[in-house]
Image (cartoon, rainbow, N blue to C red):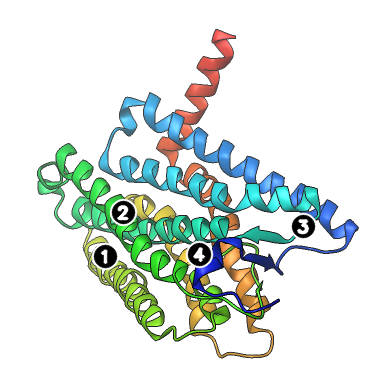
Amino acid sequence: MAAIGLANTTTFIFVLLGLPTTPQLRCVSFVVFLSIYLMTLVGNLVILTAIITDARLHTPMYFFLANLSILEMCYTTITLPNILNNIVIQSNRISFQACICQVYLFTLCATVECILLALMAYDRYVAICIPLRYSVIMNQAMCLQLASTTWITGIFNSIIQSLPTSLLPYCGLNKVDRLYCEVQPLLQLSCSDTSLNKMLTTVSASLFGVGFMTFILVTYIFIISAILRIPSLSGRLKAFSTCSSHITVVVMYYGALIFMYLRPRSSDSQRMDSVISAMYCMVIPVLNPIIYSLRNKDVKRSIVNFLILKRCLL
């Protein structure tokens, strides 16, 4: 492809190499991706419905869980419909505008998830370490303020990351070894100096990735210390059970990110990055509602009651 400068990037086309090329694999992939998308939507909608309809779940912990469920549906909606469409039309191409839109929305979701997981850890810290002040600290106004600040921060960070990326000139190779568009692969395709862009992504990763992961780790050190001071075994198990689902989700999410960005580079790194990035934006969103519904008695009870009520109304 001829060199494409800043003036005509609007006509630029990227090729997503993560999509299958053979007819057999396309058919199987379509079924798999469609199943993941539907399961993600249904699972998170069930969690949302349970939280909204059951007054016993109108607590800060479940308020943040509702935000997480909305986020997971956004994650998959950003990527999977385009993947399914490309499989159907047998095309691996994505326009410049659509690619930058994916970059913006994906960065938004990634930023919000890092902050949300940290807020959920803080909620557990207050509930377990200073329970007598829980209702004062985690009041409704504070939860709304924290959630709104989280989404606004995500919007602001995604603008900082995606806008400079959209202004870069792209030329020569236009192949993205992903199922969807992300900042890092696009920076590798630009034919200009990307030092500023790389600095912005490094600052963002340090703040929202490493920073909030460290916050979560420190928070759980205090939580575990407080749990170990509980005299009865049943009390310790009950306190730990309120954190188990969140710990599982944090380990999966940050485990994927750490493996993707901190492992040694090799000839297969690009392909492995594609697999890992697909996991934390497609597989983890479909697993989260399963984790929270299976490991949380309150959510399970609410879901069962809702299904029973719906069956009676029918």
Q: Amino acid at mark 2?
A: Met
If you read the primary sequence from the N terminus, does the residue marked by circle 4 or circle 1 appear first? 1
Expressed as whole percent of the image width and height from the top left, the position of residue 151 reads: 31, 50
Of tags 1 and 2, the one toward the viewer is: 2
Q: Amino acid at mark 3?
A: Ser
If you read the primary sequence from the N terminus, does the residue marked by circle 4 or circle 2 appear first? 2
Name the residue that disc number 1 marks.
228
At mark 3, the secondary structure is: loop
Direction from residue 282 to residue 303 in the image, left or right: left
Name the residue that disc number 4 marks.
252
Name the residue that disc number 3 marks.
91
Foreground: 95 or 303?
95
Expressed as whole percent of the image width and height from the top left, the position of residue 159 reads: 35, 61
If you read the primary sequence from the N terminus, does the residue marked by circle 1 or circle 2 appear first? 2
Q: Are marks 4 and 2 in contact (CB under 8 Å)?
A: no
At mark 2, the secondary structure is: helix
Direction from residue 162 to residue 18 in the image, left or right: right
Of tags 4 and 1, the one toward the viewer is: 4
Q: Residue at x 15, y 46 (%)?
A: 134
At mark 4, the secondary structure is: helix
